[in-house]
Amino acid sequence: MIFSKSVATVALVLFPVGAFAQLPSPCLNSDDYRYAGQNKSGGTVLRSCSNIRIKETRRQKLCLLSEVRTACPQTCGLCCEDDATFSFPMKKEAKTQKCTWLTKNNAAVRKAEYCGIDDSVGDTTIRNECPKSCDFCQNLVPLTTAAPVKSPTGTGTPTISAKPIAAPSRPPSPQPSPFPTSRPTFKPSQSPSRKPSQVPSVGPSLKPSQVPSDLPSLKPSQSPSRKPSQVPSSLPSLKPSQSPSSKPSQVPSSLPSLKPSQVPSDKPSLKPSQSPSRKPSQSPSAGPSNKPTVSIKPSAAPSKAPVGVPTVPVPAPVTPPVAPPVAACVDDSLFTFTLVTDATKSVDCAWITKNAKAIATRTSTYCGNGEIKYKGCPSTCDGCGTCADDATFTFELTNQTGKFVNCSWLPKSKNSALRISTYCPTVGSKCPQSCGYCA
């Protein structure tokens, strides 16, 4: 039972014996959970368990939500346990210690030296992984409280309720957390994780990854890939390709092509050509020329005297300009993606609308992914002409707690490929342009 006392009132919060018995063990905050909230300007902001804990009013408000209580049990005060697998380096010796070392000899000195807000190891802090040993346990945020009663008379000693509440706390959620944990289980999961592992596997995977690696492989593959790379190589290929690419290159070539293209470009050139074309254009210009044309030879004899009033020249009819052709919005016939329910099965865009009864469910499940909606299946997922970053969206960096950036941060650095592969699987639906999903 937990009780608190104030000068004017005493509020009792009652919990049955074993109310926390069904919490997962170890009871730790999820390092990968992010709560999607709103900032003062109305934009979307992703908050980690540590960020929720920083501000008490925010903690009291968000810990009333079941998803936050499940992902952040330590932040919400549901439990307080040290991570038994966590160890940290000593500052004055080349040794590492467990959390229990903080509570042994000279505990007060050790806690003052290692349990500060700036005492970090990697992307976390020691007190975040050792809350019990660092005396960093949070007060419980209750879901319901009893009505306040008048202050008792006498010595002012707080009273303890004699009976627990009739019903136990709500059972754990039937569905697992949507965010993977940083501490792997002993048995593999049935479906793949959303983020790549930090340590490579011993053997190769059965299927190639959808996102290219940051470093090239030491040996070339025996067969070419089905899709071109997103970033051009630094050196040109020794032999030209047998068929032209389906999309034009983003950067023009340094030398002109040997033959003119058979199809005109969608946009006119910025500078006029130095010599006129050999053939007239198929469509007339929208307006007349600035200067009249000069005939090569004058007529042999002047015209006879005019009869009557000279007529006013009638301007030639002008044909309205033809709008440039609009690129057709079609799905990529070579694009495939794996099913959430079966990681070993890959399907194409047509699978989403194949079953009329399952269209709504499949669309909501897969078209929310930025790569599927804008890059692979824009026609099926209604992503044509709408591929743009959300200017109000921000997200928190995984290695800098409390720091939020917008979509334009992704391609700014020389390490843009690493940023895109790290964050775009989760924020690609809000940052499709910066993630390279827009055609």
Image (cartoon, rainbow, N blue to C red):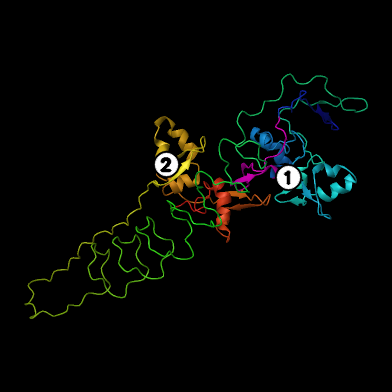
What residue did someone put label 2 on?
348
- In the rendering, at what x and y percent does residue 41 appear? 60, 48
Query: SS at mark 2?
Result: strand
Residue interval drawn in magenta:
23-50
Q: Of callouts 1 and 2, which one flags the residue occurring earlier in the amino acid sequence?
A: 1
What mark, if any, has residue 54 been given in the picture? Answer: 1
Q: Identity of the amino acid at label 2?
A: Asp
In-image side of 80 versus 347 (left or right): right
The N terminus sits in image quarter: top right
Residue placed farthest to the right in the image? 155
Q: Chief secondary structure of the magenta span?
A: loop
Q: Say if the magenta span includes residue 219.
A: no
- In the rendering, at what x and y percent does residue 439 appear? 43, 53
User: Residue at point 77% right, 48% down?
Assistant: 88
Mark 2: give few (<14), some (14-19) or many (20+) Cα within 10 Å: some
CA–CA distance in space, label 1 to label 2: 44 Å
User: Residue at point 77% right, 37% down?
Assistant: 81
